[in-house]
Image (spheres, grey):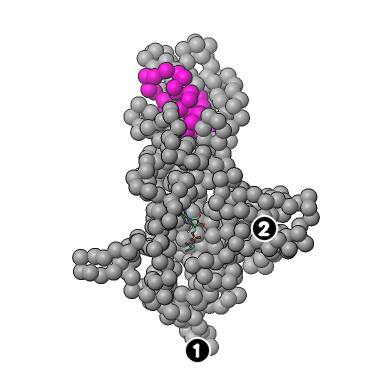
Amino acid sequence: MRLSPAVRLSEYFMPTLRETPSEAEIVSHRLMLRAGMIRQESAGIYSWLPTGYRVLRKIEQIVRDEMDRIGCHEVLMPTIQSADLWRKSGRYEDYGKEMLRITDRHEREMLYGPTNEEMITDIVAEHIKSYKDLPRMMYHIQWKFRDEVRPRFGVMRGREFLMKDAYSFDISQEAGRISYNKQFVAYLRLYARMGLKAIPMAADTGPIGGDMSHEFIILAETGESQVWCDTDLLKLDLLNMDIDHRNADQMSEVIGKVTSFYAATDEMHDEEKYQAEVPADRQMTARGIEVGHIFFFGDKYSEPMNAKVQTADGGFATVQSGSYGVGVSRLLGAIIEACHDDNGIIWPEEVAPFRVGLINLRVGDEACDAACEDFYAKLQAAGVDVMYDDRDTRAGVKFADMDLIGLPWQVVIGPKGVANGIVELKSRKTGEKEELSPEAALAKLSGSK
Ligand code: 5CA
């Protein structure tokens, strides 16, 4: 989906708040509300306003890139599913009150999908009949509904939330492990591209089931789980490991190394093992946010859904599967938890709603307006996305809003600077300011993307 390359704040809907909303318990929720990114509609259900929606789309795009890269292809399944499908796997009753059950006008039992293992396995069972059509991996990015007992922390634990869920289908357990490893590698890359250090940890499989599972965890004080890990794992440069997902041996070697360090969430923590394996000076316990969870569950769904294929020797084999989730909407909260200061959000470049915020200090001043318009046009021509604050308001308000919404770069143009042929460039992250010619500022902003 194409995002608009540039917006004028005088036409844009960004309802920022001066006051801190009292209902928000954690910083990311407070900042998302204050920056006008979301609006609560019911408990755990949100509307996504323009800047929030832009970040959501940018996160989705990174996820898409990394799925495409490993040969996992996008589909779109519906949010509403039939209860019968879930009766086949036996999960309809098991899911309990978390599942939102709906009856249509013909009294047919339906539900709002909390996940899609049953549906995708049913699709595969109908169309994939031979070992020659395996392996396959597919994903979709779709809204889910889970009627959480305690929706809280804004988009972090919602009832309606956006998830990327991918599914793999293989002829054998060994082949399935290669698909699992491809997803593992994609996960290492996709979080790193968002500016995050997501640590893979041994995890419990819960209602999804299976015998192999990892959670990807971001350390943050407000995280919902307690985690234990070896600090040497944090030193690995996960983005630059340059793993070839077509080379199964290399992949399993690297993943073997990453998973050799002790790292576990509270459900899996084994204190004795931890003390025995991790030297005291490398022990770390902290709070963490789960931003992804991958599972290998073999034939748990393919057996009841009857997903079988013909094998090379003329027999039949039950398809072996895994599922791989990324909490797309939760990631906004998680990134903000990791990237903010007292003045607001500090977006990592790849997910920022815009790369540049252009501030006109004196709207109505002919020379200042002209210089801003010129700079605005040139940024667009250079392919840099930009939000232009052309509102007729006080400079203090403009500075505060820009810091709050956290665009990586601010360009300030005022009458004095225009007279002297300079603009001010500020990095949101470091707070450093420099005065440059408009050409030099432009070169800097369009160069290091
Ligand atoms: N079918 C599997 C994987 S495709 C699955 O549903 N896994 S899950 O339950 O672990 O969810 C995947 C990810 O969705 C989680 O790691 C988390 O980041 C996100 N998530 C789960 N529940 C919520 C929620 N209530 N609000 C926001 N994000 C959530």
Residue 314's tag is 1
Mark 2 residue element: strand
N-term mark: 2 or 1: 2
Residue 121 left/right relative to 436: left
Question: Residue 177 sits in which quadrant?
Answer: bottom right
Which residues are the magenta region?
A: 388-411
- Please say whether residue 424 is visible from this viewpoint: yes
Q: Position of residue 440 (x, y in %)?
A: 56, 24
Please say if the residues under marks 2 and 1 sit with CB atoms less than 8 Å apart: no
Q: CA distance from mark 2 to mark 1?
A: 43 Å
The answer to which of 287 and 235 lies nearer the viewer is 287
- Of the residues shown, which amino acid type is indicated by label 2? Ala
How many neighbours does mark 2 have within 10 angstroms: few (below 14), some (14-19), or many (20 or more)? many
Quadrant in which the C terminus is drawn: top right
Residue found at x 43% / y 27%: 18
The residue depicted at 51 percent of the width and 14 percent of the height is 417
Residue 168 in the image: x percent, y percent? 50, 68
Q: Position of residue 124 (x, y in %)?
A: 42, 73
Q: Magenta segment: does it hold 389?
A: yes
Q: Amino acid at mark 1?
A: Gly
Q: Is residue 13 left or right of residue 409?
A: left
Marker disc for residue 263: 2
243 vs 192: above or below: below
Q: Please determine whether, in this image, residue 315 is positioned above or below residue 406.
A: below
